[in-house]
Image: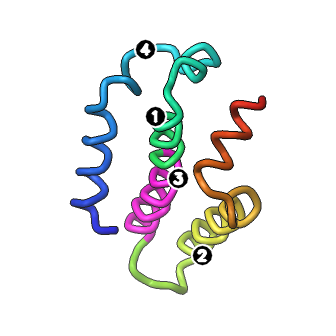
Amino acid sequence: MNHRAALLLLIASLSSGEIIAQAGHDGDWWRGLSPGAKETVITGFLDGMALGQNLALMGAGNSSDSECRSKIEQSYTYVRNRYFQNVGPGEIVSALDEL
């Protein structure tokens, strides 16, 4: 996803009103969201992880030999594979609802 598309997705998500209607992002806030809004929040979180990785790598220089770049890639890959591999937004929503 290019940067313009990611920015448009973020703006569209925040414009829904339901997601940003409450200041406290706690269990009460979560329970008050519709199932579709919950999936939007989780999708935004997952997209944010990918965007964070891309932004971090942009600041790590261009060389794939860079020690910093390698550590950033390893860190994001580890977390993604450990917690989010083969898990869709709906499954995360179900797990959070259960919690």
Task: Give the mark nearest the N terminus, 3 or 1.
Answer: 1
Q: CA distance from mark 2 to mark 3?
A: 21 Å
Q: Which residue is mark 3?
A: 46
Q: Which residue is mark 1?
A: 37
**Residue placed most toward the observer, 45 or 28:** 28
Q: Main secondary structure of the magenta part?
A: helix
- Quadrant including the N terminus: bottom left
Residue drawn at x 64%, y 18% as measured from the top left: 27
Q: Which residue is mark 2?
A: 70
Residue drawn at x 63%, y 40% as measured from the top left: 93
Q: Amino acid at mark 3?
A: Leu
Q: Which residue is mark 4?
A: 22
Q: Amino acid at mark 2?
A: Ser
- Mark 3 Cα-neighbour bin, 10 Å: few <14, some 14–19, many ≥20: some
> In which image quadrant can residue 57 be found?
bottom left
Whether pointer 4 and pointer 3 mark residues with C-beta atoms closer than 8 Å, the reply is no
Give the colouring mode of the picture.
rainbow
* Of labels 2 and 4, the one closer to you: 4
Q: CA distance from mark 3 to mark 1?
A: 14 Å
